[in-house]
Amino acid sequence: VNQLRSNFLSAYDLAVTEADVNRNEMQRRANLTETLFYMTLDAILTCEADKVPDEDQLGVRLSSLLGNRTLLACLFAACSQVVLYSFGCSNSLAWCLEASGTHAFHLFKIVESLIEAVDFPRDIVRHLRLCVDRVVDSLAWTAGSPLWKLVQQNRGRGYSAVECQRPLVAASATSPKMGKGLSALQAFYRHLHRLCDTRLAQLSSELHLLNPVSKQRAAVIINRVLRDNPGLLRNRHLDHVIACGLFAAARAAQPSPPCPIRFAHILAAHRRVANLTGSSSTVAAGGQATDTLFRTVPLDNRGNAGDIIQFYNAVFTTEEGDHIRQVLACRLLTDEEAEAHLIIRSGTSSTLLLTSGIPSSKRIGYNFLTSSDKDVQAINAAILQHATKLLGKRQATSHHIGMELSPNAAKKLNLLSTSTTAR
């Protein structure tokens, strides 16, 4: 803790810009950070003690926590951020993490425990949650983040929103029904999907020219990136992917110029959303202003950067083009049309049901996120068997919206080939 305090003072001495802040004031802020650190650490340990009634197990648990350097550094970083924010300082969350020598991804894991353990004022709680959002939308995606090790261990992929739901363990005579914990990566992705859904809804609301079908297409494109191509976020920002997904979906609505939605519209909407949600608080938590965020987007790993349009043309469409074309080949139905077609909706994302011409006992279900290649072969066999009835009547639900695939689109995607692999 003494070393963390020393590092804080050294970093503060180099970074301070307030003319009226002298050495004594720096020491005062360091003292407040240390006091808050011990207060919150005590509160967290007390909460842990309440969870572990056995004294021997409690001793092991508390020793483990107190010997965890990463935990202590994250806690000190969070406390320094609270103190500096309370004084109206310009030091960002990234600065506090660097001063404490820890990574943003680790901070994500302790902030909620901190909020639960300490009765902070509402504005502090809101600020801490904004800090978590900054970790999830950008800070955790830097090249040296521990997040990438977890992604690598997960076969280079993330999780869908469905895969981040907390599973249940069936009850038995000796054990009650209880929740099974999520992995660190699943917990991170759970927050990521919630944040993404919120941002997408806010921007879609501001983009009055964007129709419901385009919104759903954008959601499918963006969620696919988060799950199957997280590398696209390396050193970038979640809002870069959201903006590109929105633009790709809007272009499909009117492929020939002029496109109803341009990046200028998306950036203007982003600016309005930032103003409505409190841009000053966002920047204080480490966020970037809209113009800065979209003006400099990394294009490669060699340090080359460009604006959001260059990123879309040079990177996003190159890596996601095939998937975008598959999504755009599908005609999304309105809620009224879906009801008329008696489409069964599961409430999960991208679940396919082949129903027309098939007895209810033999209906085939396919989930784009979890089903295997064998399911694809079964679907192909069903299509061949009921070709006349099924082509053009293949319905799906994607975010509670039905999806109908035309015969021409089916041919383009080679759905009749038994070697087809669903991605």
Image (cartoon, helix red, strand yellow):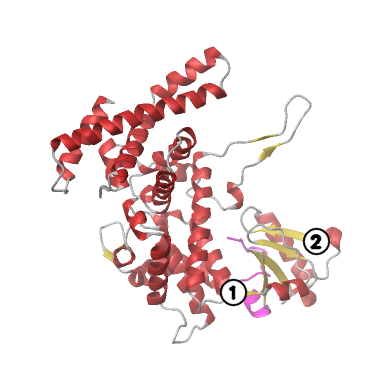
**Classed neighbour count for the residue bearing mark 2: other residues with Cα under 10 Å, few (<14), some (14–19), many (≥20):** some
User: In this picture, is 322 found above or below 109?
Assistant: below
Is-magenta flag for residue 422?
Answer: yes
**Splitting the image into 4 quarters, where does residue 367 fall?**
bottom right
Give the extent of the magenta segment. 407-423
Secondary structure beneath label 2: loop
Q: Quadrant where the N terminus lies?
A: top left
Q: Which residue is mark 2?
A: 363
Q: Is residue 413 magenta?
A: yes
From the image, tell me which residue sits under label 1.
Answer: 213
Whole-percent x, y for residue 335 in the image = 69, 72
Task: Report how far apart the C-alphas of labels 2 and 1 lie in the structure.
Answer: 26 Å
Name the residue located 79 percent from the left edge and 70 percent from the top edge. Answer: 342
Residue 313 position within the rendered picture, expressed as x and y whole percent measured from the top left: 38, 72
- Relative placement, left or right, of 164 versus 265 is right
Give x and y (percent) for residue 159.
54, 50
Task: Kindly identify the residue that appears in the image at 36 percent across and 49 percent down.
Answer: 139
Q: Relative to 401, is 160 on the left or the right? A: left
- Left or right of 11? Residue 186 is right
**For the residue marked with disc 2, what is the amino acid?**
Arg
Q: Magenta part mainly helix, strand or loop? A: loop
Residue 321 is situated, as x and y percent measured from the top left of the image, at 47, 69
Q: Amino acid at mark 1?
A: Val
Judging from the image, what secondary structure is the residue with disc 1 in? helix
